[in-house]
Amino acid sequence: MSSTAAFYLLSTLGGYLVTSFLLLKYPTLLHQRKKQRFLSKHISHRGGAGENLENTMTAFQHAVTIGTDMLELDCHITKDEEVVVSHDENLKRSTGVNVNISDLKYCELPPYLGKLDVAFQRACQCEGKDNRMPLLKEVFEAFPNTPINIDIKVNNNVLIKKVSELVKQYKREHITVWGNASYEIVEKCYKENSDIPILFSLQRVLLILGLFFTGLLPFVPIREQFFEIPMPSILLKLKEPDTMSRSQKFLIWLSDILLMRKALFDHLTARGIQVSFWNRAFWKHSLSV
């Protein structure tokens, strides 16, 4: 390679690195900052699954009473096309009955068990007397001014359409966000109603990380408005440390190093994207920002 070619190559690379760094710090030089209709620093997962039975009206009411900024809940659709709030499609874990929500009419759904294990919290249970699965419209009616994060749990076109219709009916586009870890579901949500802000799917989270580490992120437009990622170290809370191999611990450590990047979070925040990460408190009543 000639000295001239090497000079141009180094100049180009240097210019790219400087521009990438500058736009990473000041992204509004290239992108218009997204308008944030609300700010959520405290999100109640399934209504606060460590304090009440998950996804119940009692759980949601308790969360709002203690001042949560947003309710997070999960939706499925029944045989008679009612949008019901439940994390699981199969009700064996939550009700003791081995049946799918989609196979039953809403009036046929069994009640929750009195005690349920709390996900991602070892030896922890939630309990309560309110064991009825509410309809999504009931939550909308009870909390008309509370932002709600809706996890569309199954890839079902009718479910997505029904949720969109309910959001429009209750005029909640400005205080609702929806999506799923599945890229296909998020794409369908956006196509059905682009006025409702969407979550990053897992595929998009991985893409964002790849773009960040290659310096390309500042140049790429972003549709999503809510970036939620887990702290990998939360997995250490699920098992006894002595039962984990060195390779498992190393992978968790490495994942933490790759995911927990302040520069990435600051960049997304500067672009008007809300960043939240799961910590151990998340599974009780909050998701920290």
Image: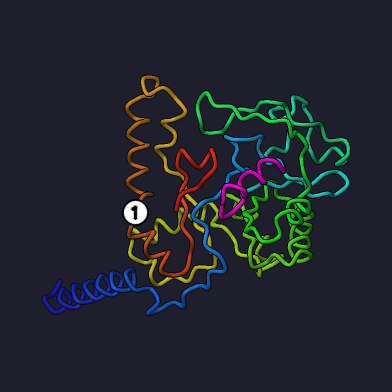
Label 1 sits on residue = 261
x then y, percent, for residue 109: 83, 35
> Which residue is located at x 64 percent, y 68 percent?
174
> Which residue is located at x 66 percent, y 26 percent?
115
Q: Quadrant of residue 279?
A: top left
x then y, percent, for residue 135: 78, 47
- Whether 59 is among the magenta residues is yes
x then y, percent, for residue 231: 42, 43
**38 sits to left or right of 30:** right
**112 sits to left or right of 62:** right
> Which residue is located at x 15 percent, y 71 percent?
1
The count of marks equals 1
43 w.r.t. 222: above or below = above
- Whether 233 is among the magenta residues is no
Tell me the SS state at disc 1.
Answer: loop
- For badge 1, the amino acid type reads Arg
269 w.r.t. 86: above or below = below
Q: Quadrant of residue 137?
A: bottom right
38 w.r.t. 259: above or below = below
128 w.r.t. 141: above or below = above
x then y, percent, for residue 190: 65, 64
Magenta part of the chain: 57-71
Q: Main secondary structure of the magenta part?
A: helix
The residue closer to the viewer here, 131 or 78, is 131
Residue at the top extreme of this rendering: 242
Label 1 environment density (alpha carbons within 10 Å; few <14, some 14–19, many ≥20): few
Q: Quadrant of residue 209?
A: bottom left
**22 sits to left or right of 28:** left
The residue closer to the viewer here, 224 or 70, is 70
